[in-house]
Image (tube, grey):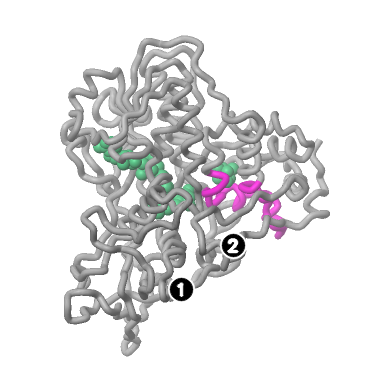
Amino acid sequence: MPDPNGFLRYDRRLPARRPVPVRIMDWREVYPPAGPELIREQATRCMDCGIPFCHDGCPLGNRIPDWNDLVRTGDWDAAVGSLHATNNFPEFTGRLCPAPCEAACVLGLGGQQPVTIKQVEVEIADAAVARGGLRPRPAPAPTGKSVAVVGSGPTGLAAAQQLARAGHAVTVYERDDALGGLLRYGIPDFKLEKHHIDRRLAQLTAEGVVFRTGVNVGVDVTAEQLRAEHDAVLLACGALQGRDTPETPGRELRGVHQAMAHLVAANRVVAAAGEERPAPATLPDGTPIDAAGKHVVIIGGGDTAADCLGVAHRQGAAGVHQLDLYPQPPVDRDAARDPWPTWPWLLRNYPAHEEGGERVFAVAVQEFVDDGTGQVRAVRIVEVTVEKRDGRRIVTVLPGSERELPADLVLLAIGFEGTEEQPLLAQLGVTRNARGAVDARPDWQTDVDGVFVAGDMHRGASLIVWAIAEGRAVAAAIHSHLGGVGALPAPVDPARQPLAAR
Ligand SMILES: Cc1cc2nc3c(=O)[nH]c(=O)nc-3n(C[C@H](O)[C@H](O)[C@H](O)COP(=O)(O)OP(=O)(O)OC[C@H]3O[C@@H](n4cnc5c(N)ncnc54)[C@H](O)[C@@H]3O)c2cc1C
Ligand code: SF4
């Protein structure tokens, strides 16, 4: 029986982050472990309210009150089992998920701070490794069916693990030289050290999953070959088409780049450096894209922008401005706009924001300014108001509010426009919808029989928790399509949306 008064005895507390002056000197993760006493105390704050809305907040349907109580009573082995029953990769979500479950925690109804669900999750995930490692669970017998998974991000990996454990022969094709999708070269090490991915890959390999890196499906292998060799194909290619701003004067200047170009280059030099100090980051053609000594302007307000900020400081930027078109959000939930248990619009301070830089809200870029040699030297901005009218975004400029910010490096982190147009799609006869995503029928098949889609490629740029949830659900659909015995868990269907008030 959980402690019904735990939340009255203990306040919400998280472990202190590593000090800023120390952590920006390296690329290691920002959070140290919580320690057994703190985590037991925080798990005790979960009262097992009876109708756990956190389950609905979490797309995976993680059994949060169950594992909170197992941590409270010290039954770590059972907690590890309970968590892995619904989540293939809790070490990723425990580190990276924005935790919509916490926004839906019933404690929030009475004005209390939510349980530190995500922190408990990561401690259980790390306990799994400490207590005997991630043991492989190979299938008892093969089914004789084979599945091709295109893309090795969290969607592809979750689906591959579920299918391999059900006895199917799974081959994951990845065009990059290393596996993990955005977890590998998109998200920096200070949010996710890469040994977490490698440990899971070793488990999947031991479970029979075959990985083929450096294979761009549609170029190195045709869709026809893939279909001939496998009984089903899963497309899990992500939503990597970065939004651009070609109409802004000066976009062509040297020093103006897509945020992902910056992040991938930085992650690659960190990966190559091992214990050494990383070399300055460059693009594949040798163009420098390192922030060292530069005035950096990041355009955008989301995860990608915050990651660029943390990278810029670690590379030794002279100064960083982060620009947002929208006004500064409130610090507390606006219950009229986003009632509990929905995900509220709030000012989100990522650890990278503690490390320096200036956030500038309610501004638009009018021009990237040339230094006379074709290199950007400044960004000309103007204050704006933004309103929605008839579903359209109307941006109004405040006259006389123009100013320049110094800029040697400008990074566009203004979102993604769906999955990339690539030869694979035409070869399969799969089309992108108006959002640049690929639609799925209720059984996760595209318009082409035997070809399935899931994750960001289906949903548009989203979150790791949704990627894993869709990966698990599409695996259940493929298993059933192949005539597999029994049913695999399917936490979401293709139409499922986050909790919303309207
Ligand atoms: C910078 C950044 C930071 C983020 N931070 C967070 C965060 O903190 N928390 C969070 O929850 N989410 C975060 N996200 C979102 C999250 O990373 C994605 O939602 C998630 O990775 C989607 O998983 P996926 O498997 O669908 O696609 P991806 O991870 O994008 O993987 C797709 C893979 O498919 C491969 N591929 C594509 N086409 C082919 C082909 N033809 N042949 C072979 N391989 C192919 C690609 O190379 C890629 O490896 C972030 C995203 C970005 C960009
Ligand atoms: S995966 Fe995300 S939403 Fe689900 S329990 Fe973990 S932190 Fe919460």
Q: Give the residue type that dot 2 points to.
A: Ala
Q: Quadrant of ligand 1?
A: top left
Is 293 above or below relative to 107?
A: below
The mark that comes first in sequence, 2 or 1, is 2
x and y percentages locating residue 141 in the rendered image: 47, 9
Q: Secondary structure at mark 1?
A: strand
Residue range (magenta): 93-119
Q: Residue at x 60, y 40 (%)?
A: 55
Tell me, yes or no, if residue 386 can be seen here. no
Q: Which residue is mark 1?
A: 359
Is residue 327 rendered to the left or right of residue 244?
right
Q: Secondary structure at mark 2?
A: loop
Closer to the camera in the image, 163 or 180: 180
Q: Give the residue type that dot 1 points to.
A: Arg
Q: Which residue is mark 2?
A: 335
- Would you say the residues marked 2 and 1 are in contact, meaning their CB atoms lie under 8 Å apart? no
Q: Residue at x 31, y 39 (%)?
A: 177
Is residue 335 rendered to the left or right of residue 393?
right
